[in-house]
Image (cartoon, rainbow, N blue to C red):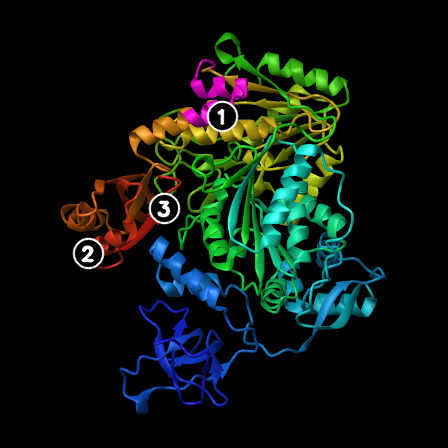
Amino acid sequence: MINPSFFDEGALVAVLTTQPLDRALDYKAPEGGCHLGAFVEVPLGPRKVLGVVWGAGKGDYDYAKVRSVLRVLDVAPMRTEMRSFLEKAAAYTLTPMPAMLRLATRAPGLGDPPSMRKVYRRGPDEPDRMTDARRRVLEFLAEYGDLSFTLKELAELSGVTSSVIKGLVKQGAVAEEDSPRDLPFAPLDPNLPSKELTKDQDRAATHVAEAVRAGRYGTTLLRGVTGSGKTEVYLEAVAACLSAGRQALVLLPEIALTAEFLKRVEVRFGARPAEWHSGATMTERRRIWRMIGQGQAQLVIGARSALFLPYQNLGLIVVDEEHDTSYKQEDGVLYNARDMAVLRASLLGAQVVLSSATPSLESWANAESGKYTRLDLEARFGPAVLPTMKTIDMRAETLPSDRWVSDTLKRAVDQRLESGEQAMLFLNRRGYAPLTLCRACGHQVGCDQCDARMVEHRFLKRLMCHQCGETKPMPTVCPSCGAEDRMAPVGPGVERLGEEAVKLFPDARVAVLSSDMYGSARALKAEIEEIAAGGADVVIGTQLVAKGHNFPNLTLVGVIDADLGLQGSDLRAAERTFQLMRQVAGRAGRAEKPGTAMLQTFQPEHPVIRAILAGDEEGFWRAEAAEREAAGVPPYGRMAGIILSGPDAAQVFDAANALARNVAPLARVGAQVFGPAPAPIARIRGRHRVRLLVKAGKGVTLQGAIAQWVSQLRLKGDIRLAVDIDPQSFY
């Protein structure tokens, strides 16, 4: 039976709620009826919950006892393609539908009626008396520029009471205004002049723009060396999409990238687009969600969750830095935004542009097989040239135990500083030191909730667990033997490297860039802007700095531990090391001055290090692809991770062993099961973790077999089971 598009009053409708239930529930359509896809509020026990009309009701329950929909929310109904996308994404990732629906309804106050509200922004005057609380409010408003906030938001984010803000209103230092709750975004003009493109850029831009105008599905891999102008190419695709009257989405892997990118978009199209990420306020999230559904937000710049917004007419999805691991959601719903972007576009008749200097092997293989179109930009834009790559053989360097910058690298940094240029020291470790131990007994400080060492963060004056976020004060007495003042940091993190840089380069301005050293995403973006404008001489950074930032005066990148990512048994270790080293090296020499990248390594003969130096990307991908194909692992095979967790280790292992003994559904499709085994980090947040790994041939439809397999297991107590299709990490 085909679902009608409208249900009259009293008709049975199936409502999918965001509650953890195994099915949609029957309700009676309310007075005035409701459309298919309508967002509704329904009674569930004593509560009122959010749901979506998913179709006609089953009618397998006494009609007299069926309750009615309480009300239809004043928002655009969920489109057919969105419901189909959620269903297919749920089937692929083996995620319950209510959890998928929660991804699509992450905006507060959807049921609130349209109304005016009081908002607050910086006023023209200064207060007659400055207090600490007033200063916090004014500094916060200054940080956020022209944005306005509700009274509750401003009070909470500034850490003050509402009376402080109202006092500032009376003084004229804060302006109180009436504003509609949800305003359309300013229209973008795709016909404004673009930057002059090179021949290669123009060829690529013409191709993607024509593909967008054709109105059909297709995926293009835009591979260009760092600094080659990939952004200008895909902005032309955005312009073609806007000219065709369709919406566009650009996904970025890192919130700190948005500031510079938003400026480029504003210059190109004459107005700011919608910005969706964890740094957006709740008020902005509600506005963006509603305006996208009404087609009054033409372009969205966002993190991976922006993929689940209710676009009215989406015609283009750009996944910038498509190789980046942050596109994989590792908690809750386990999905890869790159793959889900391709799925959603295929249902919409939209184009996807996957942009990267170092593509994922999956995308490279899809382009090789003809599934994706591939476009290459081989030269940097304008006068810039690719950096010279060098290694520093650390076996030949003599360093004291508390130093990590080699003499060779120090001399290179000194030369840049004398020339008035910037240098970057890269270390992919947050915090001050990765390990704190007792020099008396050897005890290593670990997390109380996880099987992980705690990392010293001297900036925060705390030890922190990077798995669960637990923190504790720095101990002065050993928790094991009681020795006083014998606790010592071991190994470097970026904070410790920053200390070393201050000593080595006493006249230089040293800036440490790490996501956990800034109170807000906006503060981090402001620091990056200041560095790009010349506000630092030596930049110390984690992988955050490898993601698309443009520092025009930066001419030297020194990688402190190029071998770090080559350790362990991760099947993607070589790929990720290659990508990270090439990306961070690409920060050097992006303007007129040539750049150099120097890699400190104890393994200069390692194939990955040699490939990085040679710049033979195609040779690296072909060799890596051959190894993966021979092993039958992604992208030339299928894999899935099964993670069981619970507070009792024995019970978790019993459940995992029960699964491992009953593999008939998997054996029927030729899949193998490895494990169970303790996860590399066997306890997180007090829960013991056991993994199984499923491996199958590339053509196997694995999800159905896994669903049948895990359905045999009856989980007892507080044991949870998660399925990770196409796992990216194996922690």
Could you tell me which residue is drawn at 55 percent across and 27 percent down? 582
Q: Which residue is mark 2?
A: 713
Q: Which residue is mark 3?
A: 449
Residue type, label 2: Leu
Residue type, label 1: Glu
Which is nearer the N-term, disc 1 or disc 2? 1
Which is nearer the N-term, disc 3 or disc 1? 3
Residue type, label 3: Gln
- Viewer-side label of 3, 2: 2
Other-residue count near label 3 (Cα within 10 Å), few / some / many at <14 / 14–19 / ≥20: some
Q: Secondary structure at mark 3?
A: loop
Which region of the structure is painted magenta? 604-622
Seen in the picture, residue 265 relative to 561 is either above or below; the reply is below
Could you tell me which residue is drawn at 76 percent across and 41 percent down? 195
Rendered location of residue 129, percent (x, y): 82, 60
179 or 123, nearer to the observer: 179
Rendered location of residue 245, percent (x, y): 65, 61
